[in-house]
Image: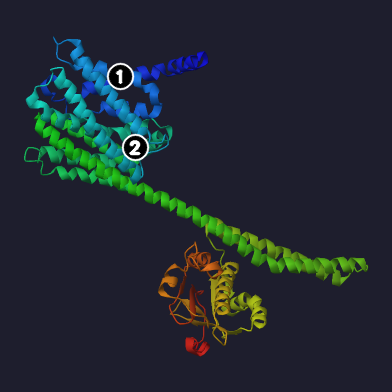
Amino acid sequence: MIDDTRAAAMEWLRRLPLLVGFIGLYVALDAASFIHPLHGLNITPWNPAPALGLVLVVRLGRIAWLPLTIAVVVAELAMRRGGLPTWQALVPALVLAGGYFLLGRLLARRLAAASLLNDRRTLFAWWWRVAVGTFLISVVYLFALRVVGLLPPARWWIGLLRFWVGDGVGISIMMPLMWWLTSPRARGLLRRTVARPESLGYLLLAGVTLWVAFGLGGHNGFKLFYLLFLPVVWAAARQGMAGAIVCAAFVQVGIIVAMRLLHYNAVSVAELQILAMAIAMVGFFVAAAVDEQRRTGQELRQSLRLAAAGEMAATLTHELHHPLTALSAYAGACEQLLERGEVGERLHSAIRCVVRESARTSEVVHRLQGFFRSGSPELESVSLGELVDSAAAPYRLRAERSGIRLRIATMPDLTLRVDRLQVEVVLRSLLGFAFDAVSDSPRQPRRIWVAAWKDGHDRVCLRIEDSGSGLTPDQVLHLFEPIAPSGSGKRQSGLAISRAIVHSHGGRLWAETSNHGVLKCELPIERHTVAPAPVAPNEAAPAVS
Protein backbone atom coordinates (compact mmCIF):
# COMPACT_ATOMS: atom_id res chain seq x y z
CA MET A 1 0.00 0.00 0.00
CA ILE A 2 2.84 2.36 0.94
CA ASP A 3 4.67 1.47 -2.25
CA ASP A 4 1.56 2.23 -4.34
CA THR A 5 1.13 5.60 -2.63
CA ARG A 6 4.79 6.42 -3.16
CA ALA A 7 4.56 5.45 -6.82
CA ALA A 8 1.46 7.63 -7.29
CA ALA A 9 3.21 10.57 -5.62
CA MET A 10 6.27 10.15 -7.83
CA GLU A 11 4.01 10.07 -10.89
CA TRP A 12 2.38 13.34 -9.81
CA LEU A 13 5.76 14.98 -9.23
CA ARG A 14 7.07 13.82 -12.58
CA ARG A 15 4.05 15.24 -14.41
CA LEU A 16 3.69 18.36 -12.26
CA PRO A 17 5.18 20.82 -14.82
CA LEU A 18 2.89 19.39 -17.52
CA LEU A 19 -0.19 19.63 -15.32
CA VAL A 20 0.59 23.18 -14.22
CA GLY A 21 1.14 24.18 -17.83
CA PHE A 22 -2.17 22.57 -18.76
CA ILE A 23 -4.04 24.60 -16.14
CA GLY A 24 -2.49 27.84 -17.36
CA LEU A 25 -3.22 27.05 -21.03
CA TYR A 26 -6.80 25.99 -20.26
CA VAL A 27 -7.56 29.23 -18.42
CA ALA A 28 -5.91 31.27 -21.21
CA LEU A 29 -7.97 29.55 -23.91
CA ASP A 30 -11.14 30.03 -21.87
CA ALA A 31 -10.40 33.74 -21.46
CA ALA A 32 -9.57 34.19 -25.17
CA SER A 33 -12.87 32.60 -26.18
CA PHE A 34 -15.01 34.65 -23.79
CA ILE A 35 -17.12 36.06 -26.63
CA HIS A 36 -20.74 37.21 -26.29
CA PRO A 37 -21.18 35.69 -22.80
CA LEU A 38 -24.82 35.09 -21.93
CA HIS A 39 -25.67 37.11 -18.77
CA GLY A 40 -21.96 37.41 -18.11
CA LEU A 41 -21.68 33.64 -17.64
CA ASN A 42 -19.18 31.39 -19.35
CA ILE A 43 -21.75 30.51 -22.03
CA THR A 44 -20.17 31.48 -25.34
CA PRO A 45 -20.58 30.33 -28.97
CA TRP A 46 -16.95 29.13 -29.11
CA ASN A 47 -15.27 27.20 -26.32
CA PRO A 48 -12.03 25.39 -27.35
CA ALA A 49 -10.68 24.92 -23.81
CA PRO A 50 -12.65 21.68 -23.13
CA ALA A 51 -10.92 20.11 -26.14
CA LEU A 52 -7.63 20.51 -24.28
CA GLY A 53 -9.16 18.99 -21.15
CA LEU A 54 -10.52 15.98 -23.03
CA VAL A 55 -7.12 15.33 -24.63
CA LEU A 56 -5.50 15.38 -21.19
CA VAL A 57 -8.04 12.90 -19.79
CA VAL A 58 -7.70 10.55 -22.77
CA ARG A 59 -3.90 10.70 -22.65
CA LEU A 60 -3.35 10.45 -18.88
CA GLY A 61 -6.48 8.72 -17.59
CA ARG A 62 -7.60 9.14 -13.97
CA ILE A 63 -4.60 11.22 -13.00
CA ALA A 64 -6.08 14.07 -15.08
CA TRP A 65 -9.16 14.60 -12.91
CA LEU A 66 -7.50 16.98 -10.41
CA PRO A 67 -5.79 19.37 -12.87
CA LEU A 68 -8.92 19.36 -15.04
CA THR A 69 -11.10 20.25 -12.06
CA ILE A 70 -8.71 22.98 -10.95
CA ALA A 71 -8.57 24.43 -14.47
CA VAL A 72 -12.36 24.48 -14.88
CA VAL A 73 -12.93 25.98 -11.42
CA VAL A 74 -10.28 28.70 -11.92
CA ALA A 75 -11.73 29.56 -15.33
CA GLU A 76 -15.27 29.74 -13.97
CA LEU A 77 -14.27 31.87 -10.98
CA ALA A 78 -12.23 34.17 -13.20
CA MET A 79 -15.14 34.74 -15.56
CA ARG A 80 -17.98 35.05 -13.03
CA ARG A 81 -19.63 38.39 -12.35
CA GLY A 82 -18.28 40.30 -9.41
CA GLY A 83 -20.24 40.55 -6.20
CA LEU A 84 -21.71 37.04 -6.32
CA PRO A 85 -20.93 34.39 -3.68
CA THR A 86 -18.13 32.05 -4.67
CA TRP A 87 -20.24 28.95 -4.15
CA GLN A 88 -22.61 30.03 -6.93
CA ALA A 89 -19.76 29.68 -9.44
CA LEU A 90 -18.10 26.74 -7.70
CA VAL A 91 -21.06 24.33 -7.89
CA PRO A 92 -21.61 24.65 -11.68
CA ALA A 93 -17.82 24.49 -12.21
CA LEU A 94 -17.56 21.19 -10.35
CA VAL A 95 -20.51 19.83 -12.35
CA LEU A 96 -18.81 20.93 -15.56
CA ALA A 97 -15.44 19.42 -14.61
CA GLY A 98 -17.12 16.11 -13.74
CA GLY A 99 -18.94 16.08 -17.07
CA TYR A 100 -15.74 16.71 -19.05
CA PHE A 101 -13.90 14.03 -17.10
CA LEU A 102 -16.61 11.43 -17.76
CA LEU A 103 -16.73 12.37 -21.46
CA GLY A 104 -12.94 12.05 -21.67
CA ARG A 105 -13.08 8.59 -20.10
CA LEU A 106 -15.78 7.63 -22.60
CA LEU A 107 -13.67 8.83 -25.50
CA ALA A 108 -10.65 6.96 -24.14
CA ARG A 109 -12.46 3.68 -24.76
CA ARG A 110 -12.46 4.45 -28.48
CA LEU A 111 -9.30 6.48 -28.97
CA ALA A 112 -6.14 4.44 -28.65
CA ALA A 113 -2.96 6.34 -27.87
CA ALA A 114 -1.65 5.73 -31.40
CA SER A 115 -4.94 6.66 -33.11
CA LEU A 116 -4.84 9.75 -35.31
CA LEU A 117 -8.59 10.04 -36.01
CA ASN A 118 -7.74 9.28 -39.63
CA ASP A 119 -10.22 6.52 -40.37
CA ARG A 120 -13.92 7.14 -40.86
CA ARG A 121 -15.16 4.63 -38.30
CA THR A 122 -13.06 6.07 -35.47
CA LEU A 123 -13.85 9.61 -36.58
CA PHE A 124 -17.60 8.98 -36.60
CA ALA A 125 -17.51 7.17 -33.25
CA TRP A 126 -15.54 10.07 -31.74
CA TRP A 127 -17.83 12.74 -33.19
CA TRP A 128 -21.17 11.29 -32.12
CA ARG A 129 -19.80 10.72 -28.61
CA VAL A 130 -18.72 14.36 -28.55
CA ALA A 131 -22.13 15.51 -29.84
CA VAL A 132 -24.15 13.47 -27.35
CA GLY A 133 -21.72 14.03 -24.48
CA THR A 134 -21.59 17.82 -24.88
CA PHE A 135 -25.39 17.93 -25.07
CA LEU A 136 -25.74 16.04 -21.78
CA ILE A 137 -23.06 18.19 -20.15
CA SER A 138 -24.87 21.30 -21.37
CA VAL A 139 -28.17 20.13 -19.90
CA VAL A 140 -26.66 19.34 -16.49
CA TYR A 141 -24.52 22.50 -16.42
CA LEU A 142 -27.43 24.76 -17.35
CA PHE A 143 -29.59 23.02 -14.77
CA ALA A 144 -26.91 23.69 -12.14
CA LEU A 145 -26.80 27.36 -13.14
CA ARG A 146 -30.58 27.48 -12.83
CA VAL A 147 -30.51 25.86 -9.38
CA VAL A 148 -27.96 28.29 -7.96
CA GLY A 149 -29.91 31.22 -9.43
CA LEU A 150 -27.37 32.41 -12.03
CA LEU A 151 -29.61 31.83 -15.06
CA PRO A 152 -33.17 33.16 -15.42
CA PRO A 153 -35.75 30.50 -16.36
CA ALA A 154 -36.69 32.32 -19.56
CA ARG A 155 -33.11 32.11 -20.86
CA TRP A 156 -32.58 28.40 -20.16
CA TRP A 157 -33.24 27.15 -23.69
CA ILE A 158 -31.17 29.91 -25.29
CA GLY A 159 -28.35 29.19 -22.88
CA LEU A 160 -28.54 25.46 -23.60
CA LEU A 161 -28.30 26.01 -27.35
CA ARG A 162 -25.40 28.47 -27.14
CA PHE A 163 -23.41 26.43 -24.65
CA TRP A 164 -23.89 23.22 -26.65
CA VAL A 165 -22.87 24.98 -29.86
CA GLY A 166 -19.84 26.54 -28.18
CA ASP A 167 -18.59 23.28 -26.66
CA GLY A 168 -19.53 21.17 -29.66
CA VAL A 169 -17.78 23.45 -32.17
CA GLY A 170 -14.75 24.05 -29.98
CA ILE A 171 -14.20 20.34 -29.32
CA SER A 172 -15.07 19.14 -32.85
CA ILE A 173 -12.65 21.52 -34.57
CA MET A 174 -9.85 21.95 -32.04
CA MET A 175 -9.60 18.54 -30.38
CA PRO A 176 -8.11 16.80 -33.49
CA LEU A 177 -5.40 19.48 -33.63
CA MET A 178 -4.63 19.19 -29.92
CA TRP A 179 -4.74 15.41 -30.11
CA TRP A 180 -2.17 15.43 -32.91
CA LEU A 181 0.03 17.97 -31.13
CA THR A 182 0.30 15.63 -28.12
CA SER A 183 1.56 12.73 -30.27
CA PRO A 184 5.24 12.76 -31.35
CA ARG A 185 4.49 10.92 -34.59
CA ALA A 186 1.54 13.17 -35.41
CA ARG A 187 3.55 16.31 -34.61
CA GLY A 188 6.10 15.20 -37.16
CA LEU A 189 3.36 14.73 -39.77
CA LEU A 190 1.93 18.18 -39.01
CA ARG A 191 5.37 19.77 -39.22
CA ARG A 192 6.09 18.17 -42.58
CA THR A 193 2.62 19.12 -43.82
CA VAL A 194 2.94 22.78 -42.89
CA ALA A 195 6.43 22.91 -44.45
CA ARG A 196 5.13 21.93 -47.88
CA PRO A 197 4.69 24.72 -50.45
CA GLU A 198 1.18 23.47 -51.18
CA SER A 199 0.15 24.22 -47.59
CA LEU A 200 0.85 27.91 -48.18
CA GLY A 201 -1.43 27.70 -51.22
CA TYR A 202 -4.51 26.44 -49.43
CA LEU A 203 -3.90 28.69 -46.42
CA LEU A 204 -3.75 31.69 -48.77
CA LEU A 205 -6.94 30.47 -50.41
CA ALA A 206 -8.52 30.19 -46.95
CA GLY A 207 -7.54 33.79 -46.24
CA VAL A 208 -8.99 34.96 -49.55
CA THR A 209 -12.25 33.06 -49.04
CA LEU A 210 -12.54 34.44 -45.50
CA TRP A 211 -12.18 37.96 -46.89
CA VAL A 212 -14.71 37.28 -49.63
CA ALA A 213 -17.19 35.61 -47.26
CA PHE A 214 -17.07 38.34 -44.64
CA GLY A 215 -16.08 41.32 -46.76
CA LEU A 216 -18.60 40.79 -49.57
CA GLY A 217 -21.23 38.41 -48.27
CA GLY A 218 -21.01 38.42 -44.50
CA HIS A 219 -23.64 41.04 -43.88
CA ASN A 220 -25.92 39.66 -46.55
CA GLY A 221 -26.99 36.38 -45.05
CA PHE A 222 -23.55 34.74 -45.37
CA LYS A 223 -24.33 33.84 -48.98
CA LEU A 224 -20.65 33.41 -49.82
CA PHE A 225 -19.77 31.43 -46.70
CA TYR A 226 -19.82 28.17 -48.68
CA LEU A 227 -16.57 29.25 -50.35
CA LEU A 228 -14.77 28.22 -47.17
CA PHE A 229 -15.35 24.61 -48.16
CA LEU A 230 -12.79 25.03 -50.98
CA PRO A 231 -9.54 25.36 -48.98
CA VAL A 232 -10.58 22.75 -46.40
CA VAL A 233 -11.52 20.16 -49.01
CA TRP A 234 -8.36 20.96 -51.00
CA ALA A 235 -6.19 20.41 -47.93
CA ALA A 236 -8.05 17.22 -47.00
CA ALA A 237 -7.90 15.74 -50.50
CA ARG A 238 -4.21 16.49 -50.98
CA GLN A 239 -2.73 16.02 -47.51
CA GLY A 240 -5.24 13.86 -45.67
CA MET A 241 -6.08 14.42 -42.03
CA ALA A 242 -2.97 16.50 -41.36
CA GLY A 243 -3.94 19.05 -44.00
CA ALA A 244 -7.60 19.07 -42.93
CA ILE A 245 -6.67 19.70 -39.27
CA VAL A 246 -4.36 22.59 -40.11
CA CYS A 247 -6.75 24.24 -42.56
CA ALA A 248 -9.87 23.74 -40.41
CA ALA A 249 -8.15 25.29 -37.38
CA PHE A 250 -6.93 28.20 -39.52
CA VAL A 251 -10.42 28.80 -40.90
CA GLN A 252 -11.96 28.58 -37.41
CA VAL A 253 -9.58 31.16 -35.96
CA GLY A 254 -10.14 33.34 -39.01
CA ILE A 255 -13.90 33.20 -38.51
CA ILE A 256 -13.60 34.19 -34.84
CA VAL A 257 -11.29 37.10 -35.67
CA ALA A 258 -13.58 38.29 -38.47
CA MET A 259 -16.64 38.14 -36.22
CA ARG A 260 -14.87 40.12 -33.50
CA LEU A 261 -13.67 42.76 -35.94
CA LEU A 262 -17.07 43.11 -37.58
CA HIS A 263 -18.96 43.07 -34.25
CA TYR A 264 -21.39 40.29 -35.09
CA ASN A 265 -24.21 39.70 -32.66
CA ALA A 266 -24.47 36.50 -30.61
CA VAL A 267 -27.12 34.91 -32.85
CA SER A 268 -25.04 35.38 -35.98
CA VAL A 269 -21.94 34.05 -34.23
CA ALA A 270 -23.77 30.88 -33.18
CA GLU A 271 -25.08 30.34 -36.72
CA LEU A 272 -21.63 30.85 -38.21
CA GLN A 273 -20.11 28.44 -35.71
CA ILE A 274 -22.54 25.72 -36.77
CA LEU A 275 -21.56 26.33 -40.40
CA ALA A 276 -17.87 26.25 -39.44
CA MET A 277 -18.33 22.91 -37.71
CA ALA A 278 -20.07 21.52 -40.80
CA ILE A 279 -17.15 22.66 -42.97
CA ALA A 280 -14.60 21.14 -40.61
CA MET A 281 -16.41 17.81 -40.30
CA VAL A 282 -16.77 17.51 -44.08
CA GLY A 283 -13.05 18.15 -44.37
CA PHE A 284 -12.25 15.58 -41.68
CA PHE A 285 -14.35 12.88 -43.31
CA VAL A 286 -12.82 13.60 -46.74
CA ALA A 287 -9.38 13.44 -45.14
CA ALA A 288 -10.20 10.15 -43.39
CA ALA A 289 -11.30 8.65 -46.71
CA VAL A 290 -8.08 9.86 -48.36
CA ASP A 291 -5.92 8.44 -45.57
CA GLU A 292 -7.77 5.12 -45.71
CA GLN A 293 -7.22 4.96 -49.46
CA ARG A 294 -3.53 5.67 -49.01
CA ARG A 295 -3.20 2.99 -46.35
CA THR A 296 -5.01 0.55 -48.62
CA GLY A 297 -2.61 1.45 -51.40
CA GLN A 298 0.36 0.86 -49.12
CA GLU A 299 -1.07 -2.50 -48.06
CA LEU A 300 -1.63 -3.37 -51.72
CA ARG A 301 1.94 -2.41 -52.56
CA GLN A 302 3.11 -4.59 -49.69
CA SER A 303 0.99 -7.44 -51.04
CA LEU A 304 2.50 -6.84 -54.47
CA ARG A 305 5.97 -7.01 -53.00
CA LEU A 306 5.13 -10.28 -51.26
CA ALA A 307 3.56 -11.63 -54.44
CA ALA A 308 6.61 -10.51 -56.40
CA ALA A 309 8.87 -12.24 -53.89
CA GLY A 310 6.89 -15.45 -54.34
CA GLU A 311 6.98 -15.12 -58.11
CA MET A 312 10.69 -14.37 -57.99
CA ALA A 313 11.34 -17.48 -55.94
CA ALA A 314 9.27 -19.61 -58.32
CA THR A 315 10.91 -18.04 -61.37
CA LEU A 316 14.40 -18.46 -59.98
CA THR A 317 13.65 -22.08 -59.15
CA HIS A 318 12.51 -22.72 -62.70
CA GLU A 319 15.21 -20.72 -64.47
CA LEU A 320 18.07 -22.08 -62.37
CA HIS A 321 17.00 -25.69 -62.75
CA HIS A 322 18.56 -26.15 -66.19
CA PRO A 323 21.94 -24.42 -65.63
CA LEU A 324 22.36 -26.09 -62.24
CA THR A 325 21.60 -29.48 -63.76
CA ALA A 326 24.15 -28.77 -66.50
CA LEU A 327 26.67 -27.59 -63.93
CA SER A 328 26.25 -30.81 -62.00
CA ALA A 329 26.71 -32.88 -65.15
CA TYR A 330 29.80 -30.98 -66.32
CA ALA A 331 31.34 -31.02 -62.85
CA GLY A 332 30.80 -34.78 -62.69
CA ALA A 333 32.44 -35.14 -66.10
CA CYS A 334 35.42 -33.07 -64.92
CA GLU A 335 35.75 -35.29 -61.87
CA GLN A 336 35.70 -38.46 -64.01
CA LEU A 337 38.27 -37.02 -66.42
CA LEU A 338 40.58 -36.10 -63.58
CA GLU A 339 40.27 -39.59 -62.11
CA ARG A 340 41.36 -40.98 -65.47
CA GLY A 341 44.32 -38.62 -65.56
CA GLU A 342 42.88 -36.54 -68.43
CA VAL A 343 44.51 -33.11 -68.72
CA GLY A 344 43.95 -32.38 -72.38
CA GLU A 345 41.31 -30.71 -74.49
CA ARG A 346 38.38 -32.78 -73.21
CA LEU A 347 38.99 -31.59 -69.64
CA HIS A 348 39.44 -27.98 -70.77
CA SER A 349 36.22 -28.19 -72.78
CA ALA A 350 34.29 -29.50 -69.75
CA ILE A 351 35.74 -26.75 -67.56
CA ARG A 352 34.70 -24.12 -70.14
CA CYS A 353 31.18 -25.55 -70.02
CA VAL A 354 31.18 -25.25 -66.22
CA VAL A 355 32.27 -21.62 -66.48
CA ARG A 356 29.63 -20.91 -69.14
CA GLU A 357 26.79 -22.41 -67.10
CA SER A 358 28.02 -20.62 -63.96
CA ALA A 359 27.91 -17.34 -65.85
CA ARG A 360 24.43 -18.16 -67.10
CA THR A 361 23.27 -18.91 -63.55
CA SER A 362 24.71 -15.64 -62.33
CA GLU A 363 23.02 -13.77 -65.19
CA VAL A 364 19.63 -15.31 -64.35
CA VAL A 365 19.89 -14.18 -60.74
CA HIS A 366 21.23 -10.74 -61.68
CA ARG A 367 18.57 -10.01 -64.31
CA LEU A 368 15.64 -11.11 -62.21
CA GLN A 369 16.91 -9.30 -59.14
CA GLY A 370 17.31 -6.18 -61.25
CA PHE A 371 13.75 -6.38 -62.48
CA PHE A 372 12.17 -7.05 -59.09
CA ARG A 373 14.24 -4.26 -57.56
CA SER A 374 13.74 -1.53 -60.15
CA GLY A 375 11.55 -2.96 -62.91
CA SER A 376 14.07 -1.80 -65.51
CA PRO A 377 14.99 -4.28 -68.27
CA GLU A 378 18.48 -4.67 -69.74
CA LEU A 379 17.77 -4.37 -73.43
CA GLU A 380 19.54 -6.25 -76.20
CA SER A 381 18.78 -7.18 -79.80
CA VAL A 382 17.19 -10.63 -80.02
CA SER A 383 15.71 -12.51 -82.97
CA LEU A 384 12.03 -13.26 -82.46
CA GLY A 385 12.37 -16.83 -83.73
CA GLU A 386 15.34 -17.52 -81.49
CA LEU A 387 13.52 -16.06 -78.50
CA VAL A 388 10.41 -18.20 -79.02
CA ASP A 389 12.40 -21.37 -79.66
CA SER A 390 14.44 -20.86 -76.50
CA ALA A 391 11.33 -20.24 -74.39
CA ALA A 392 9.44 -23.20 -75.84
CA ALA A 393 12.34 -25.69 -75.61
CA PRO A 394 11.53 -26.91 -72.06
CA TYR A 395 7.89 -27.54 -73.05
CA ARG A 396 8.52 -29.79 -76.04
CA LEU A 397 9.36 -32.78 -73.86
CA ARG A 398 6.43 -31.96 -71.58
CA ALA A 399 4.11 -31.90 -74.57
CA GLU A 400 5.30 -35.37 -75.69
CA ARG A 401 4.87 -36.83 -72.23
CA SER A 402 1.43 -35.27 -71.73
CA GLY A 403 0.04 -36.15 -75.14
CA ILE A 404 -0.37 -32.47 -76.05
CA ARG A 405 0.37 -31.30 -79.56
CA LEU A 406 2.55 -28.18 -79.40
CA ARG A 407 2.72 -26.38 -82.74
CA ILE A 408 4.88 -23.30 -83.25
CA ALA A 409 4.31 -21.43 -86.49
CA THR A 410 7.16 -19.92 -88.48
CA MET A 411 8.10 -16.67 -86.82
CA PRO A 412 8.46 -13.43 -88.84
CA ASP A 413 12.05 -12.38 -89.43
CA LEU A 414 12.02 -9.64 -86.82
CA THR A 415 14.48 -8.40 -84.23
CA LEU A 416 13.23 -7.27 -80.84
CA ARG A 417 14.89 -4.84 -78.49
CA VAL A 418 14.12 -6.55 -75.19
CA ASP A 419 15.61 -8.10 -72.10
CA ARG A 420 15.99 -11.63 -73.39
CA LEU A 421 15.83 -13.38 -70.06
CA GLN A 422 12.81 -11.45 -68.83
CA VAL A 423 10.81 -12.01 -72.02
CA GLU A 424 11.69 -15.71 -71.96
CA VAL A 425 10.23 -15.80 -68.44
CA VAL A 426 7.03 -14.21 -69.80
CA LEU A 427 6.70 -16.65 -72.71
CA ARG A 428 7.30 -19.63 -70.46
CA SER A 429 4.68 -18.33 -68.04
CA LEU A 430 2.16 -18.02 -70.88
CA LEU A 431 3.01 -21.49 -72.19
CA GLY A 432 2.72 -22.90 -68.68
CA PHE A 433 -0.72 -21.30 -68.35
CA ALA A 434 -1.78 -22.84 -71.66
CA PHE A 435 -0.49 -26.29 -70.67
CA ASP A 436 -2.38 -26.12 -67.37
CA ALA A 437 -5.55 -25.06 -69.18
CA VAL A 438 -5.32 -27.95 -71.62
CA SER A 439 -4.50 -30.45 -68.89
CA ASP A 440 -7.54 -29.35 -66.88
CA SER A 441 -9.90 -29.54 -69.84
CA PRO A 442 -11.60 -32.78 -70.98
CA ARG A 443 -11.62 -31.63 -74.59
CA GLN A 444 -9.90 -33.73 -77.22
CA PRO A 445 -7.60 -33.43 -79.04
CA ARG A 446 -5.35 -31.44 -76.76
CA ARG A 447 -3.47 -28.76 -78.68
CA ILE A 448 -1.47 -25.55 -78.22
CA TRP A 449 -0.58 -23.16 -81.05
CA VAL A 450 1.96 -20.33 -80.97
CA ALA A 451 1.90 -17.74 -83.77
CA ALA A 452 3.16 -14.20 -84.36
CA TRP A 453 2.70 -11.43 -86.88
CA LYS A 454 3.84 -7.87 -87.38
CA ASP A 455 1.25 -5.43 -86.09
CA GLY A 456 1.74 -2.01 -87.65
CA HIS A 457 5.21 -0.60 -88.22
CA ASP A 458 6.83 -1.12 -84.86
CA ARG A 459 5.00 -3.93 -83.06
CA VAL A 460 4.86 -7.69 -83.09
CA CYS A 461 1.95 -9.62 -81.64
CA LEU A 462 2.39 -13.14 -80.28
CA ARG A 463 -0.64 -15.31 -79.77
CA ILE A 464 -0.80 -18.47 -77.68
CA GLU A 465 -3.97 -20.52 -78.17
CA ASP A 466 -4.98 -23.69 -76.44
CA SER A 467 -7.85 -26.13 -76.74
CA GLY A 468 -8.91 -25.62 -73.14
CA SER A 469 -12.26 -24.37 -71.97
CA GLY A 470 -11.37 -20.68 -72.34
CA LEU A 471 -12.02 -17.78 -70.00
CA THR A 472 -15.19 -16.03 -68.92
CA PRO A 473 -15.35 -12.20 -68.95
CA ASP A 474 -14.98 -12.15 -65.16
CA GLN A 475 -11.93 -14.41 -65.32
CA VAL A 476 -10.38 -12.21 -67.99
CA LEU A 477 -10.98 -9.16 -65.78
CA HIS A 478 -9.15 -10.65 -62.78
CA LEU A 479 -6.64 -12.86 -64.57
CA PHE A 480 -3.62 -10.60 -64.09
CA GLU A 481 -4.30 -9.57 -60.51
CA PRO A 482 -1.39 -10.21 -58.12
CA ILE A 483 -3.58 -12.29 -55.80
CA ALA A 484 -5.32 -15.09 -57.62
CA PRO A 485 -9.10 -15.23 -57.24
CA SER A 486 -10.65 -18.23 -55.55
CA GLY A 487 -10.47 -21.33 -57.64
CA SER A 488 -7.87 -20.09 -60.11
CA GLY A 489 -5.03 -21.95 -58.41
CA LYS A 490 -1.75 -22.34 -60.23
CA ARG A 491 -3.16 -21.33 -63.61
CA GLN A 492 -2.64 -17.68 -62.70
CA SER A 493 0.85 -18.13 -61.35
CA GLY A 494 3.31 -15.69 -62.86
CA LEU A 495 0.83 -13.75 -65.01
CA ALA A 496 0.85 -10.62 -62.83
CA ILE A 497 4.65 -10.47 -62.98
CA SER A 498 4.58 -11.27 -66.70
CA ARG A 499 2.31 -8.30 -67.38
CA ALA A 500 4.62 -6.06 -65.34
CA ILE A 501 7.61 -7.24 -67.39
CA VAL A 502 5.81 -6.67 -70.68
CA HIS A 503 4.68 -3.19 -69.58
CA SER A 504 8.27 -2.34 -68.61
CA HIS A 505 9.19 -3.06 -72.25
CA GLY A 506 6.45 -0.78 -73.52
CA GLY A 507 4.23 -3.67 -74.60
CA ARG A 508 0.86 -5.16 -73.69
CA LEU A 509 -0.31 -8.51 -72.36
CA TRP A 510 -3.95 -9.51 -72.34
CA ALA A 511 -6.39 -12.39 -72.58
CA GLU A 512 -9.51 -12.71 -74.72
CA THR A 513 -12.89 -14.13 -73.92
CA SER A 514 -13.46 -17.21 -76.07
CA ASN A 515 -14.60 -20.83 -76.00
CA HIS A 516 -10.89 -21.74 -75.92
CA GLY A 517 -7.81 -20.13 -74.40
CA VAL A 518 -6.35 -17.07 -76.13
CA LEU A 519 -3.45 -15.04 -74.72
CA LYS A 520 -1.78 -12.24 -76.64
CA CYS A 521 1.46 -10.41 -76.05
CA GLU A 522 2.48 -7.29 -77.94
CA LEU A 523 6.12 -6.17 -77.95
CA PRO A 524 8.01 -3.39 -79.75
CA ILE A 525 10.39 -4.42 -82.54
CA GLU A 526 13.78 -2.89 -83.12
CA ARG A 527 13.88 -0.05 -85.60
CA HIS A 528 15.19 -0.62 -89.11
CA THR A 529 14.11 -4.24 -88.97
CA VAL A 530 13.28 -5.60 -92.41
CA ALA A 531 10.51 -8.14 -92.25
CA PRO A 532 8.52 -10.10 -94.80
CA ALA A 533 4.79 -9.76 -95.13
CA PRO A 534 3.03 -10.51 -91.85
CA VAL A 535 1.82 -13.99 -91.24
CA ALA A 536 -1.95 -13.94 -90.80
CA PRO A 537 -3.10 -15.43 -87.53
CA ASN A 538 -5.39 -17.97 -89.12
CA GLU A 539 -2.60 -19.16 -91.43
CA ALA A 540 -0.23 -19.72 -88.53
CA ALA A 541 -2.66 -21.62 -86.38
CA PRO A 542 -5.96 -23.15 -87.39
CA ALA A 543 -9.04 -22.39 -85.37
CA VAL A 544 -9.49 -24.46 -82.25
CA SER A 545 -12.46 -26.72 -82.29
Q: Is residue 260 left or right of residue 105?
A: left
Residue located at (59% from left, 71% from top): 424
Residue located at (21% from left, 23% from top): 32
Q: Nearer the viewer, mark 1 or mark 2?
A: 1
Residue located at (52% from left, 64% from top): 497
Mark 2, Cα crowd under 10 Å, few <14 / some 14-19 / many 20+, is some
Q: Which residue is mark 1?
A: 69
- Tell which circle, 1 or 2, labels the residue nearer the N-terminal end: 1
Give the colour scheme of this rendering: rainbow
The circle drawn on residue 266 is none
Which residue type carries mark 2? Val
**Above or below: residue 223 compared with residue 537:** above
**Above or below: residue 527 compared with residue 369:** below
**Above or below: residue 411 compared with residue 288:** below
Residue 197 in view of the camera: no
The part of the image, by quadrant, that contains residue 48 is: top left
Q: Is residue 196 left or right of residue 331?
A: left
Who is closer to the viewer here, 44 or 365? 44
Who is closer to the viewer here, 477 or 108? 108
Q: Which residue is mark 2?
A: 194
Which residue type carries mark 1? Thr
Disc 1 secondary structure class: helix
Q: Is residue 187 left or right of residue 172?
A: right
- Residue 502 at what x, y percent from top left? 50, 68
Cα–Cα span, label 1 and label 2? 34 Å
- Residue 21 at what x, y percent from top left? 35, 19
Who is closer to the viewer here, 248 or 194? 248
Residue located at (14% from left, 40% from top): 213
Disc 2 secondary structure class: helix
